[in-house]
Every structure is written in C-alpha cells, then in structure tokens.
C-alpha cells in the first residue's frame, strides 16, 4: 500500500528540513522525499498549505488498560492519540495490575496491535507492584518491549532503589522516567502552594516537593551513569537542576506538559476539578521559566500526561477528585497557541518537541522523515482552529474544553495508513492554495 | 430587585471575597435592626414565613449551627437539620447527589458547613436555592467575619482605620481569610501573627502585615483576635509543644498591656484555654467573646433575610 502526501511544507527538524515537497510512503516506510513525485496506484493526500511533520510521539500517556477500562482503553486512548496527531504513545505502567511483568507488557502490545490506532510503546514499572520497594524484572520488561521504566503516579521514594534502577537500566539501554515528588512535603496537598492555595484554603504542594527530588535524582544519575528522564517538569528549581546536570554531562532529559505551559494556579479559583493534576498548575513565574526552558533547549519533549478519569470520579469536591487531565487531543493546538502564536519559539522547534525530541529521549524509531524512516506522518493546519469539546477519549476531564486554539491536526498517518483525516482542514487548504491542482482530492484512491 | 445598596447581588453567600463594601455595610446595617428583635419578649418576626431552610452540616459545629437555627426560627422559617452522620453520606452518597435530593424537596435556602473548600460553590452552581457558606475547610466562614465586624463596629463605631491583629493558627483558619477580606475591604489595618509554620504561603498578598512576634502584633492594636490552634488539623511538625506555643503566642493579661488602652479581645471559638488564650483574658473585661455569639444571631438573620430578597427599608 502506497501513500503520497503532496505539496506540503515538510518540517523535519532532525534533518534540518523545511521546504515544500512530496512524501511517498511505500510498505509502511518512507520511500522517497522530493519534488513532483509520481507513483502508480497510490492514495494521495493534497497537503497544499499544510505542514507535514514526522509523526508526533507522546512520552507520557495513561491508557488505563488493563484494569481501568471505564476511564480509557487502548482502543479509545489511541483513537484520541491519532486525533491529536500522535502516531506513537508511551503507555505508563500504573495500570491494574501494573505493568511490572512481561505478561502485562505482552497484553498491552497485543491489544494495541489488535485494536490500537497508533503505535503503543509500553513503559514498565521500576518497582514490583509500583510499591517502591524492590526492582521489577526490568530485563524481562525490556525484552517484552518496554522502552523505559517508571513508577509514574508516584515517586521512587527510596533513594537506594532509584540508584539501583538507574544502574540496572543503564545495562538495558533504557531510561528511568521519574515522577518527582517528595511525599512528605506534599502531605495531602491538592494544588500548588502559593497565594491561590492560601486564598482558596486548599492544601498546597510546594515547588520544593518536586525540586528536591529532581536534584536528588540528577545527582544519582551522575553517580550511576544511568539515563534519567524527568516527567512533567513544572518548577524553576527543577529546570535549574536539569540545566546543571546537562552542563555537567549527566544523562538527563525532561518533558513538559502543555497545561503547565498554558495555565497557572490562578485557574483553580473555579474549584473545577479539571484543573487538578499532579504536579499541580504552578504560579506564573514558574510558567514563565518553563517557556524559557522550552526556548533555550533545556526541554527535550512536550508530553501530555494524558490522564483520563471517569466523569463521576471528577464530579466531586476538589479535595476528593483524582489528579489528572486528558491531553492527547489538545496538546498540539494548546502548545502552538502558547508557544508559536505568542512568539516564544518558531514552528520547527515546536515540531522538534513533538517528534525528534521525544524519539531521542527514549531512543524510539521515528521522529524524523527520511528514506527508510517509519511511515508515520502528522499533517498540521497552522491556520485552522481547535475547539476542544468533542473528544475521542472516553474521558472529558480537560481544562481546555470550550477554549479556542490556533492550530489544527489535519491528518495522522501511521505506518502508511491514514488513521485520521480532518476533511475541514483539507478542503480549506485547497481553497487557500495558490495553484489548485484540479484533479487531486484529499484521500483519493487513484487507479 | 437585588441591586444598589438595598439588596445583595448574588443569590448566595459563598464568602466575603465576592462582596462589595456596600453589601457588607448593608448586611451590618440590617443586622442592627434584627439585634433589637432578640431583645423583645416575643423574639420572632414573620419575614421568612413559609420558607424552608436546610442546615446541611457535614462537619462538627455547635455554635454556628445553633446560631443559624435560632436566626432561622426568629425569622419564622421552617428549618431542617441534616448532618453527615446517620445519613446516606455514610453510605457513600456524593455531596452533589445529596444536594440534588434535598433540592427535590424544594428548600429555599441551604446553609452548608463542609470540611472541603469550595463545597458551597458546588451546590450554588447547581441548585436554584440560596446557598450560605457556614464554613468550608480553610477557605471562608463569611458569617463569622460579618459578626466580628458587627461587634467591632458596635464598640468602636467604625471599621475604617481600626488596627486589628489576628494571632494564631492562620494556616488552617477559614475565619481569618474571611476576616482579612472583610476588614481590608472596609479599610481596617490587619496584622497577622503566628509562627511561620502556621502562616500560609504569600498571605501578605492579601493586603496584610505579617509578624512573628506577639508583642509586635499587639503594639498599637485596638482589636486582638485570637485563633484556636486547630489541633485536629495539625501535622506533627508545625509546633514543638503547646506549652511552647502558649509561652510564645498565648495572650495573657500582662502581654495584653502592650496593646492600645482598652483594646478589645475577640475569639471565634471554640477556645483552647491555656493554649492560645489565658482564662483571665477570655473572661476579663476586655473580652467580647460572648458579644460575638449574641451578635452572630442578628447577623445571620440579616443574611437570611437579605438573601430571601428582603430590603433594608422594609425591616
């Protein structure tokens, strides 16, 4: 099966490409990239006026299956992923049972092949049962297909266990993904500790809760030579610790979520549980520092921390609601609006944060487009708008519902298969194109 | 109907923060009229006749619950008391379901006390009844601040420019938050005192002065408001011992001499005698603690009356 994506602006940061070309995918891989490509019996997408990028990769997704299928399934979560332009997601280990043994990893992979819309890379648990006491069988997990290990949802609290995890995973060539939180400092906190937690009477989570643990783990990464990836980085001190690590040659990468870039703790004034997540929305000065860290290259990836919850679970008092919001279907548009439209970075850097950045951090295939690359492509309509509300995810717990964001996912191609196509972007792109190609229609079968 | 200074803008009283200075003044002025009702041989007016008020107390309370109930009865409302224990809440019913079921019985007002901040707003956003916040976690306790202000105004004749020092467990206190909103809106000068471990983050941004010495807080104070050390809400690490707390921040007759001559002493109750306040002070001539309780009924009558659509001129 062949697919020709014609006349789009290809932005491939890993290869320094930014020009209008055609991309031909044959048998699931990129066959050629160039101008005026022709091919027999191909499906064609006219990407005139649109941006063609390597498929987006999300390093941080909670698919909830097995065990919490009322929140999300591999099928519904990956459907949300392709709607959001993601061709691959990394599935966190805190399922029920957790992904702390080979059989669970295999089940996730099998189900994603059977019913998934995009690639699913499982992340294994660091510790057995996510209990933070003994290492899970990391080599087994790696062998079964896990691309990283993490106890995400909770920190690896025991420093000795973290040390051992970094040492052991170094042997396996995979990163340890750290959810950084000092549970004693958090102590029942439900939002960022600052002026608004004081005003609202809600218990605060201090920035130091995250920062002390990031500092600890950067030092442990130095001690062990292991590869550390900081999940959902949200504070000034955490950024500083990562910068320090980089400067000292320590192997540390990090991700930031769109909601920490777009929102602050001020939003919690509504007491809406769609603003409750962990780490919490921080204050404006932390948000500004994150924007700086995006601009100066400290941040490797934008990751969603897509955390679906059932409506009933969130429809309670703020204190009682579970942490987490969905993010797959809003990530790009929110980031585009906050980072590119407002002039923090240019579009190629944003694409990098969704493609080659995450691919490099976890050593994943994809993230760039050249001959022989996986046929994973995301097509973006920078002029279109995203109005969140009608989600493919089972869950609706998003703080962005009802908003309006510049940037729209026009199409998602996984392994040469068109998994999502937005007819509206396609038709509008044709209208705005300078030299309309008369016979071409979006997703038209030729021959 | 609820415009200008003769009515309240919102159907609910969720906190002092959303109120204007005019609305606060309206409530206090209205309460003056109602205070007189409580002095009569027949302590009842027909203002809320035929109206149903549900007192939804999901957290322990004596003073506030009783005060509301008396206020409701003196306004001739039908009242119903509902508490978490012995109800469907113990069977796992959510707050929203509880409220919607109560609402199906067509109450006109719901008075809610709840340990989780924002709970009254959850009800107010979903129900057509007026919702009155009788204390939500560490967020707000608006009728307490109103009765405190009423008491200060009654004694000093003004709120503007009054030096008020609030001492104690600021972090866990909803009373202090409502009082800061109210007093700063009315032009009073507010000083907070307590150990840094009981001082919430960035509270000075609310327009108050923060000190960590009782003597400094008392200097020039016309009103000293002592807060209870909320033993049940403390982590183990906030205070070394109650003995040390008393020695550092406990209000004794000797230390009170630092304050301005004739300074008034207030406490929202319940008191921990010998922890934040010496009995000599609590029971002394400076103490307004029981006046606060008396005034609580009048203030709550005013709030109920105004939320029911009443006007100052009619009272």
Image (tube, coloured by chain):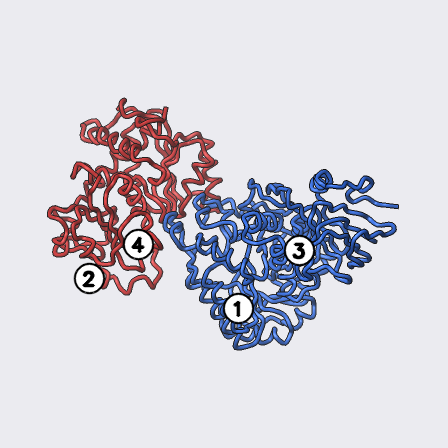
Chain colours: A blue, B red
Q: Tell me if B89 is positioned left or right of A343 in this view.
A: left
* Tag nearer the camera, 1 or 3: 3
Residues at marks 4 and 1 touching, judged by CB atoms closer than 8 Å: no
Return the residue nearer the eye: B31 or A192: A192
* Tag nearer the camera, 2 or 4: 2
What's the mark number on residue A132? 1
* Tag nearer the camera, 3 or 4: 3
The chain carrying label 1 is A
Separation of marks 2 and 4 at Cα, in angstroms: 17 Å
The chain carrying label 2 is B
Query: Is B149 rendered above or below residue A183?
Result: above
Q: Position of residue A371 (x, y in %)?
A: 77, 61
Query: Is A73 rendered above or below residue A252?
Result: above
Q: Position of residue A389 (x, y in %)?
A: 60, 41
Return the residue nearer the eye: A249 or B109: A249
Q: Tell me if B234 is positioned left or right of B261 in this view.
A: right
Separation of marks 3 and 2 at Cα, in angstroms: 62 Å
The residue under label 4 is: B230
Residues at marks 3 and 2 touching, judged by CB atoms closer than 8 Å: no
Q: Is residue B90 visible?
A: no
The residue under label 3 is: A56
Separation of marks 3 and 4 at Cα, in angstroms: 51 Å
Question: What residue is shown at x 60% (from left), y 75% (from top)?
Answer: A168
The residue under label 2 is: B247
Question: What residue is shown at x 73% (from left), y 51% (from top)?
Answer: A20
Q: Is residue B223 visible?
A: yes
Q: Earlier in the sequence, mark 2 or mark 4?
A: 4
């Amino acid at each position: 099966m062949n697919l020709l994506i014609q006349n789009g602006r290809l932005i491939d940061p890993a290869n320094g490409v930014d020009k209008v070309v055609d991309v031909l995918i044959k048998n699931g891989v990129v066959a050629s990239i160039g101008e005026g490509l022709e091919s027999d019996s191909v499906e064609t997408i006219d990407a005139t006026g649109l941006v063609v990028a390597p498929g987006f990769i999300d390093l941080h997704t909670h698919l909830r299956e097995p065990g919490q299928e009322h929140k999300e399934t591999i099928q519904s979560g990956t459907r949300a992923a392709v709607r959001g332009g993601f061709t691959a997601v990394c599935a966190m280990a805190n399922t029920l049972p957790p992904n702390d043994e080979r059989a669970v990893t295999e089940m996730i992979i099998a189900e994603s092949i059977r019913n998934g819309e995009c690639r699913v890379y499982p992340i294994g648990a660091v510790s057995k049962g996510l209990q933070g006491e003994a290492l899970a069988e990391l080599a087994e997990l790696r062998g079964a297909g896990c691309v990283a290990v993490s106890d995400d949802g909770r920190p690896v609290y025991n420093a000795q266990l973290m040390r051992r995890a970094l040492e052991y995973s170094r042997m396996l060539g995979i990163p340890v993904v750290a959810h950084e939180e000092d549970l004693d400092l958090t102590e029942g906190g439900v939002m960022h500790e600052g002026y608004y937690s004081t005003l609202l009477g809600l218990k605060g989570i201090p920035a130091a809760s995250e920062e002390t643990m990031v500092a600890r783990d950067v030092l442990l990464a130095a001690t062990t030579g292991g590869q550390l990836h900081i999940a959902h980085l949200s504070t000034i001190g955490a950024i500083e610790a990562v910068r320090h690590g980089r400067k000292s040659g320590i192997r540390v990468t990090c991700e930031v979520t769109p909601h920490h870039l777009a929102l602050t703790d001020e939003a919690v004034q509504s007491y809406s549980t769609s603003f409750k997540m962990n780490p919490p929305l921080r204050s404006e000065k932390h948000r500004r520092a994150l924007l700086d860290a995006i601009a100066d290259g400290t941040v490797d990836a934008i990751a969603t921390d897509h955390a679906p919850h059932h409506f009933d679970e969130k429809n309670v008092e703020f204190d009682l609601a579970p942490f987490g919001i969905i993010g797959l279907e809003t990530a790009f548009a929110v980031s585009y609006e906050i980072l590119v439209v407002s002039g923090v970075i240019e579009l190629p850097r944003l694409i990098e944060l969704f493609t080659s950045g995450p691919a490099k951090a976890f050593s994943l295939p994809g993230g760039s487009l050249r001959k022989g690359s996986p046929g994973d492509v995301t097509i973006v309509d920078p002029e279109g708008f995203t109005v969140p509300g009608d989600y493919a995810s089972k869950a609706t717990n998003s703080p962005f519902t009802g908003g309006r964001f510049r940037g729209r996912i026009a199409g998602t191609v996984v392994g040469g298969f068109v998994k999502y196509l937005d007819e509206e972007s396609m038709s509008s792109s044709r209208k705005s194109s300078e030299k309309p190609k008369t016979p071409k229609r979006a997703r038209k079968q030729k021959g | 109907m609820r415009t200008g200074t003769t009515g309240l803008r919102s159907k609910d009283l969720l906190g002092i923060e959303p109120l204007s200075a005019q609305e606060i003044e309206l409530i206090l002025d209205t309460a003056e009229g109602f205070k007189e009702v409580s002095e009569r041989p027949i302590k009842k007016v027909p203002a809320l006749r035929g109206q149903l008020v549900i007192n939804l107390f999901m957290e322990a309370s004596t003073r506030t619950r009783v005060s509301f109930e008396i206020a409701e009865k003196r306004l001739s409302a039908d009242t119903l008391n509902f508490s978490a224990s012995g109800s469907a809440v113990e069977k796992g019913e959510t707050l929203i379901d509880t409220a919607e079921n109560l609402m199906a019985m067509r109450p006109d007002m719901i008075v809610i006390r709840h340990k989780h901040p924002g709970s009254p707003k959850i009800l107010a956003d979903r129900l057509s009844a007026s919702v009155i916040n009788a204390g939500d976690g560490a967020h707000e306790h608006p009728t307490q601040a109103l009765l405190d202000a009423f008491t200060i105004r009654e004694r000093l004749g003004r709120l503007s420019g009054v030096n008020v020092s609030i001492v104690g467990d600021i972090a866990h206190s909803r009373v202090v938050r409502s009082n800061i909103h109210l007093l700063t809106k009315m032009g009073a000068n507010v000083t907070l005192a307590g150990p840094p471990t009981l001082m919430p983050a960035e509270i000075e941004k609310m327009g108050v002065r923060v000190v960590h010495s009782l003597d400094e807080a008392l200097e020039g104070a016309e009103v000293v408001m002592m807060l209870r050390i909320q033993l049940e809400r403390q982590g183990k690490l906030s205070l070394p011992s109650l003995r040390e707390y008393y020695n550092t921040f406990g209000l004794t007759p000797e230390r009170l001499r630092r304050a301005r001559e004739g300074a008034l002493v207030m406490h929202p109750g319940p008191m921990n005698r010998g922890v934040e306040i010496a009995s000599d002070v609590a029971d002394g001539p400076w103490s307004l603690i029981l006046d606060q309780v008396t005034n609580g009924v009048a203030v709550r009558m005013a709030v109920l009356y105004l939320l029911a659509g009443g006007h100052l001129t009619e009272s």
